[in-house]
Image: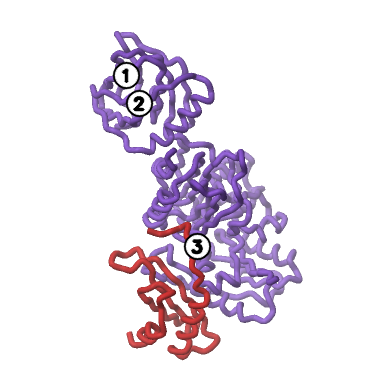
Amino acid sequence: MLIEHKTPVTVLTGFLGSGKTTLLNRILTEQHGKKIAVIENEFGEIGVDNELVIGADEEIFEMNNGCICCTVRGDLIRILGNLMKRKDKLDYILIETTGLADPAPVAQTFFVDDEMKEQYSIDGIVTVIDAKHVLMHIEDSDECQQQIAFADVILLNKIDLINPAELQELENRIRRMNPMAKIHHTQNCELAIDNILNVKAFDLSKKVEFNPDFLKEELPFEWAGVYELDNKNYDWILQAGPDETMDMLIEPISDLDENTIEKAKKKAIIQFSEEALSKKNKAYLHSKGKLNQLVLPNSESIFKIKPTEAGKYIFLTQHLPEEFSAVLQADNQIIEPIWQNEYAASHEHDDEVTSVGISLEGNLDGYKLNTWLSKLLQEKGVDIFRMKGILSIQNEPRRFVFQGVHMLFDGKPDRIWEKNEPRLNQLVFIGRNLDRQELNKSFRACLAKG
Amino acid sequence: MLNLFAEKPDNSLKIKEIKNWTRKVFELNDDCHIIVTELQCQEPDCPDLETVIAFWTTDQDREQYKIYKPIADVNLSDIHNLMLD
């Protein structure tokens, strides 16, 4: 049987002075005896004899008129093409980029040509960060943000130069930008090399792991409350608040037990992705089967509710009612909910580069999903740096796993869903100016009906 | 629209053939590295898929060409036409 053997390639990125060359030297020392080619853009101080140190000139090759998604590195294509012709097989290739390099064209180079894909496998992108000085660049350097965003492994190096509280704050910030990367704290880049090499970050056969804290279910509503209502007129009164509109769903509910509430929540997630009917001051709100969009001017608004029959009704609101001092009133009496719960609000980040995690149970409509993802990659591919996910597609017994760099998409069916395993879709996008709410809403709209 | 979930066609033999044609038509030596790739163009009026061929005659000199059809449809006369353009 022919055993496929591709030469793994690790890309080392990081600002000048972060410790990249130290890491490179450490790898070469520890992996002594292996045939490792090092491709460098800036000749550093490699302290280990290595006859395979190759200088590269960072030739940016735009295959399609300036589109970043179609930009690769011409110098790497040439160098890797020459290395392919060597009679003795290399064990590993390390590419050290300049401090100001965009990792995307480097990563994309490995997907551009079939011969390249046959011979090499990109193993991972490792970014070394100077924990003391990174804050000077993180705000205003696109390259610094991209190097963090693209990384599979991040070394927070020189941690001896900052205190534990600063380190924690820095790690939290980096974690928000890139929740997929494995973060290591180091001094002088000291860590076991198996954390750096052969991590198989681009290998779809490897178990896809997500940080559960990051992938907490993000709901389209921040509050739910259950009211006992009669078949009569009620007023839902709101004052001016932080938003000009608010989506709101009202549905009958049979009980207050956990299962019934959970079922109503799941149904509401789908209903919130549907088109809402605009309702202005004094309008009647739908109290079954339709999403209302409350238009909220800079003054008090009163919306009418008249249930068709008496019973319990669950109200689900996009924002917290208290943000609008909302009350339900009938016959000049305020009606209090008999049950209510607040749900976690969306995360907020100050950084332009951020990540969006989606975790949603249910089967997806394959056609809708393909349409959504195609449109997303075409319109936002430039801003999406990396993405990864596990999907549950209707009538497909196997999980679908995927990953991508900008517009390059790679996906395949994975293992079979287990019998009682929840059909949980999990996706992570890392990119610039991502619209969290829109991504969540449009993904929810891909759920299959029924 | 892309079909992200469709099996990708195996173009490897065709790519080798296109590389051989390119080497012959442009009289490139064996050391000259050629790439052949298929891009989906986002520009209006462009076909969905186009083929990009690039090679380096020296480290500094890159030539690149586009054929406005998928890899599977490229033929020898397309490569000859590149020489004429």
Observer-nearest residue: A449 or A325? Answer: A449
Q: Residue furthest right?
A: A33
Q: Residue at x 29, y 25 (%)?
A: A285
Observer-nearest residue: A298 or A212? Answer: A212
Q: Is the residue A422 above or below the residue A248 in the image?
A: below
Q: Do labels 1 and 2 touch, CB within 8 Å?
A: yes
Q: Is residue A45 visible?
A: no
Could you tell me which secondary element the residue under label 3 belongs to? loop
Residue type at numbered disc 2: Lys
For mark 3, what is the residue? B7
Chain in red, by letter, is B
Instruction: For the N terminus of chain A, give its image quadrant.
Output: bottom right
Percent coordinates x, y for residue A37 in the rendering = 65, 72
Number of residues whose C-alpha sits closer than 10 Å to that of mark 2, classed few (under 14), some (14–19) or many (20 or more): some
Q: Chain of mark 2?
A: A
For mark 2, what is the residue? A288
Residue type at numbered disc 1: Thr
Residue type at numbered disc 3: Glu
Chain in purple, by letter, is A
